[in-house]
Amino acid sequence: MVSIGNVNRLGRAHMALQPQNAIYVIDLFGTASFAFSGALRAIDRRPDFVGMVLLAGATAVGGGVLRDIILRREAFIVHDWGYPAVILASVVVTFLFPAMVVAREKLLRYFDAVGLGVFSAVTASALWQTPGTNPLSVLFIATFTGCAGGVIRDLLIDKPSLVLQNELYVTPVVIGAAGLMLVCSLGAGELTGFFTAMLLTTILRCVAIYRDWRLPRILALDPSPRAEPSHAASKADFYCDP
């Protein structure tokens, strides 16, 4: 069986197993969704085409490149024409028909959820199949790389990162990666583990968008009490008579 950890390689489009080919197609769909979200994030600033490509590319493949650096392997985008092609196509559509894309922004959030589920599942599976990787590292790295593209995008346009806003975005990735490790530890195959992680992450994220689920936030701290004026100070020290 071909390892899921290698699904981003050049030859995966020619794999004989239909599930592997399906993963590749879904991964391209997720990449396009991330690219749309990157282009849309700064559309209020009316960027030019090159700026849109940079933002869309950072969002779509930033996390994947970081993952491959961590795993010390060649970046998946180097040899595969599919990823830059879908990024460019997404930017062209957004650039030529911005009103149409903005009108469907909420629908694209669900597409983004699919992309998040696919990408985080690919990352978690690649890490789980790497010898010597501990489960806690799988959770952390899958989460970091899953959010990396969006964080880079928001840094480039100087906007508050969605990761730090009160949205249920990171938690589905953690639950999905944990589900993958659980089913694989029970003897399930790599494909079963991948689809478990993908479905858990995608479904939880979609439900969170639809139901507006949010995690509890830290309680606001009481402001420090105002310093009392010294007894030695007179009224004239604080007020000026007209």
Image (cartoon, rainbow, N blue to C red):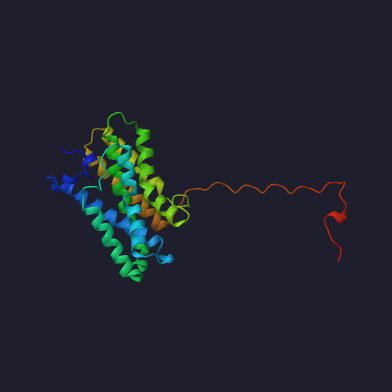
Can you tell which quarter of the image residue 17 is in? Answer: top left
Q: Quadrant of the N terminus?
A: top left
Q: Position of residue 44 (x, y in %)?
A: 43, 66
User: Can residue 67 be seen?
Assistant: yes
Viewer-nearest residue: 207 or 64: 64
Q: Position of residue 88 (x, y in %)?
A: 27, 60
- Say which residue appears at 74% left-offset and 49% top-offset: 226
Q: Is residue 153 left or right of residue 79?
A: right
Residue situated furthest left in the rendering: 16
- Say which residue appears at 17% left-offset and 39% top-offset: 2
- Say which residue appears at 69% left-offset and 47% top-offset: 224
Total number of numbered discs in the rendering = 0
Q: Position of residue 26 (x, y in %)?
A: 24, 52
User: Can residue 111 be seen?
Assistant: no
Viewer-nearest residue: 177 or 160: 160
Q: Quadrant of the C terminus?
A: bottom right
Q: Position of residue 149 (x, y in %)?
A: 37, 50
Viewer-nearest residue: 129 or 185: 129
- Say which residue appears at 25% left-offset and 55% top-offset: 84
User: In this picture, is 48 found above or below 77?
Assistant: below
Can you tell which quarter of the image residue 237 is in? Answer: bottom right
